């Protein structure tokens, strides 16, 4: 797996793992990154710090998965403590954290820290559009473009991000980006421009990676990897 700045292949991130068994399923099915939730009050995949530490280690033990801290937290000191305890190198700021949080993490974090800032998109465009330059200056490594739910929900809404909704945003970005928001094995054709853009780094999936019971499905994840030609998709087909 290469760094955001030296990206060679398309990454597949799956979000909301809650057990070591999830790691085995995701690793075998072709995932590259796995999102672990902490600091998301009431979230269905919320983890306490001890469990986060255990699952981050389980992800690394697969030899192919990189854990990502997915959080609504804005307290830089608390975030720094969690990252230090867990050994996680990627943090995804999934709420409306300010550029100052990114700057604080960059100042306090270790040299290998990768900061992913979610940009929330609704029918009117990107909610944080005016802050994008500030996020870039503060030290963000990667943006994640995600669809806001009709009720204002952020994250794991299952609602699809329309390519047209970010057509005027993406050309202004100076950093690589991940696509989220209803990504599935069936809608790669809906992103002919975004999925071939030079800044396109990969995809982030949750809902479509699960079966009817809400558990991660190896076949679903593998199908997504294959249809989107992600980095480890060749392993899926042997």
Image (tube, rainbow, N blue to C red):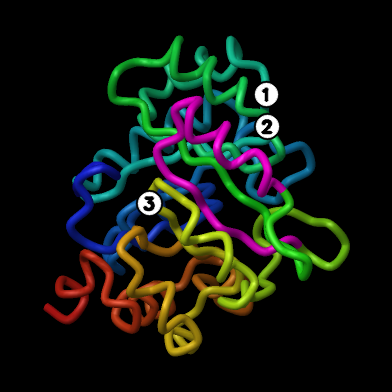
Res. 147 image quadrant: bottom right
Q: Residue, x 46% and y 34% (percent of image)? A: 140
Residue furthest out toward the left: 238
Query: Disc 2 versus disc 3: distance between alpha carbons?
Result: 19 Å
Which stretch is magenta? 128-148
Residue that carries the numbered disc 3 in the rendered image: 176
Q: Quadrant of the C terminus?
A: bottom left
Please give the residue where the numbered disc 2 appears in the rendered image.
Answer: 97
Q: Position of residue 100 (x, y in %)?
A: 62, 20
Alpha carbon separation for disc pair 1 and 2: 6 Å
Residue 66 visible = yes
Residue found at x 68% / y 32%: 97
Residue at image coords 49%, 66%: 216
Q: Disc 1 to disc 3, how far (Cα)?
A: 23 Å
Front tag of 2 and 3: 3
Asked if residue 142 lies in the magenta stretch, the reply is yes
The question of residue 40 being in magenta is answered with no
Q: Secondary structure at mark 1?
A: loop
Q: Earlier in the sequence, mark 1 or mark 3?
A: 1
From what the image shows, is residue 211 above or below residue 23? below
The answer to whether mark 1 and mark 2 are in CB contact below 8 A is yes
Q: Earlier in the sequence, mark 1 or mark 2?
A: 1
């Amino acid at each position: 797996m290469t760094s955001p700045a030296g990206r060679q292949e398309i990454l597949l991130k799956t979000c909301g793992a809650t057990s070591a068994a999830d790691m085995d399923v995701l690793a075998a099915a072709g995932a590259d990154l796995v999102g672990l939730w902490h600091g998301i009050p009431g979230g269905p995949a919320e983890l306490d710090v001890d469990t986060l530490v255990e699952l981050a280690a389980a992800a690394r033990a697969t030899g192919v998965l990189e854990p990502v801290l997915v959080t609504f937290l804005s307290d830089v000191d608390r975030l720094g403590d969690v990252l230090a305890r867990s050994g996680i190198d990627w943090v995804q700021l999934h709420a409306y954290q300010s550029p100052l949080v990114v700057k604080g993490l960059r100042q306090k974090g270790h040299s290998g820290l990768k900061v992913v800032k979610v940009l929330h998109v609704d029918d009117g465009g990107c909610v944080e559009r005016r802050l994008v330059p500030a996020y870039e200056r503060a030290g963000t490594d990667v943006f994640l473009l995600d669809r806001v739910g009709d009720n204002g929900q952020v994250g794991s809404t299952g609602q699809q991000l329309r390519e047209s909704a970010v057509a005027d945003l993406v050309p202004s970005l100076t950093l690589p980006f991940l696509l989220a928001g209803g990504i599935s094995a069936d809608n790669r054709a809906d992103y002919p421009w975004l999925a071939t853009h030079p800044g396109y780094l990969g995809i982030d999936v949750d809902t479509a990676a699960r079966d009817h019971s809400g558990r991660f499905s190896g076949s679903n994840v593998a199908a997504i990897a294959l249809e989107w030609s992600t980095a480890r998709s060749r392993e899926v087909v042997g």
